């Protein structure tokens, strides 16, 4: 049980007041005081461990199932006694240009907020430290933590989108560089696959984030809306950047395929031209290699040099014609 709890603290009037040993008693005390809430952070709880927490906080069974199962689509769920926001975390590895996807779930209810993390570590400790330095924000209640997590994740999206844009610029330069760069098509497909994984974390979040700003959503005070609107604007910007990346990737892929097709056509023209240059002397040599008795030029002293001259002349004419046509 203790292993899954990363941190648990009571916040009173915007300040961290205590670190309780029993979160159940702390929750009762926070509800009794009226100006406090409990923030408990969990990391990859098992079903048995989370059942204990779920029972104490009165979470809906479906919400508890989502928290344990993970691999959820970004969403906002409203239950009778709680609010659940599911976010995808993304960690980018520049060395192999791959992404690791994780999840953060935020439960907000009466005098409590619970964060549940699955997958790669996210800077929740830094977030907690930052929020603790913002007492005016924490005075808005548990939803302030929801805003902080939301803002942290979306800011990481912005950073990643900028990184991907830089990677895409390098890829674009390789595609249009003189000569053929090895493995460009594979890089484009790999990049597009990772961009789609990123898109699956950002695009579905647009609708839930807009719902957070509705006045009828419980547990989110109106004074927090300006902060949330700023995050929604950042998310909109991220989705626009991801859409731009996807369109540009498609254009780069089409351009690369066109380049490959043109290169293949050029190669075929060159092969055909050289085959024609080889075919003419082969045809002339084949005619004079038939060894019929009555062939007019066989007994002429100039027959052999004339045949060679004919071959050379035909090859020169063909070479010049193919060169002028751009085949060689």
Image: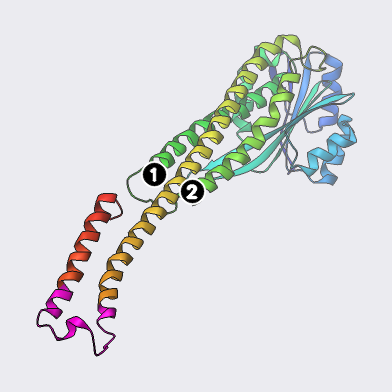
The quarter in which the N terminus is drawn is top right
Residue 88 visible in the snapshot: yes
In the image, which residues are magenta?
A: 285-308
Residue 220 image point, x, y percent: 77, 16
Identify the mark at residue 174; answer none if there is no mark: 1
Q: Secondary structure at mark 1?
A: helix
Helix, strand or loop under label 2: helix
Magenta span contains residue 180? no
Name which quarter of the figure residue 154 lies in: top right
Q: Name the N-terminal-most of marks 2 and 1.
A: 1
Q: Is residue 115 left or right of residue 152?
A: right
Visible residue check, residue 1:
no
Q: 205 and 33: which one is in front? A: 205
Q: Residue, x 54% and y 34% (percent of image)?
A: 247
Residues packed near mark 2 inside 10 Å, few (<14), some (14 to 19) or many (20 plus)? some
Answer above or below: position of 41 versus 234.
below
The residue lying toward the viewer, choosing from 171 and 255, is 255
At a point 66% along the width and 25% down the height, the residue shown is: 150
Residue 259 lies, in percent from the top left, at 42, 47
Circle 2 is placed at which residue position? 187
Give the residue at the far left of this rendering. 301
Quadrant assignment for the C terminus: bottom left
* Disc 2 to disc 1, C-alpha distance: 10 Å
Dot 2 and dot 1 residues touching (CB under 8 Å): yes
Q: Is residue 251 left or right of residue 23?
A: left
Can you say whether 26 is above or below 196 in the image? above
């Amino acid at each position: 049980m203790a292993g899954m709890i990363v941190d648990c603290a009571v916040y009173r009037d915007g300040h961290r007041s205590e670190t309780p040993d029993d979160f159940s008693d702390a929750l009762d005390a926070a509800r009794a005081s009226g100006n406090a809430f409990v923030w408990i952070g969990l990391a990859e709880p098992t079903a048995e461990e989370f059942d204990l927490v779920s029972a104490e906080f009165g979470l809906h069974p479906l919400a508890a199932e989502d928290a344990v199962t993970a691999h959820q689509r970004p969403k906002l769920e409203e239950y009778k006694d709680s609010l659940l926001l599911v976010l995808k975390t993304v960690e980018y590895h520049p060395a192999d240009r791959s992404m690791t996807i994780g999840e953060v779930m935020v439960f907000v209810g009466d005098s409590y907020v619970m964060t549940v993390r699955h997958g790669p570590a996210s800077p929740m400790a830094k977030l907690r430290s930052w929020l603790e330095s913002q007492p005016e924000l924490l005075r808005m209640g548990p939803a302030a933590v929801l805003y902080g997590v939301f803002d942290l994740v979306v800011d990481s999206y912005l950073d990643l989108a900028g990184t991907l844009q830089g990677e895409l610029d390098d890829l674009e330069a390789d595609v249009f560089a003189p000569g053929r760069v090895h493995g460009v098509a594979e890089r484009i497909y790999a990049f597009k696959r990772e961009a789609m994984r990123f898109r699956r974390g950002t695009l579905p979040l647009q609708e839930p984030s807009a719902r957070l700003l509705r006045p009828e959503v419980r547990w989110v005070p109106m004074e927090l809306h300006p902060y949330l609107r700023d995050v929604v604007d950042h998310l909109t910007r991220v989705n626009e950047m991801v859409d731009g990346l996807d369109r540009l990737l498609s254009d780069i892929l089409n351009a690369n395929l066109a380049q490959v097709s043109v290169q293949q056509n050029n190669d075929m023209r060159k092969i055909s031209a050289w085959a024609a240059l080889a075919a003419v002397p082969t045809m002339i040599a084949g005619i004079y290699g038939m060894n019929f008795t009555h062939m007019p030029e066989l007994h002429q002293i100039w027959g052999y040099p004339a045949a060679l001259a004919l071959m050379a002349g035909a090859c020169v004419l063909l070479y010049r014609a193919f060169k002028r046509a751009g085949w060689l």
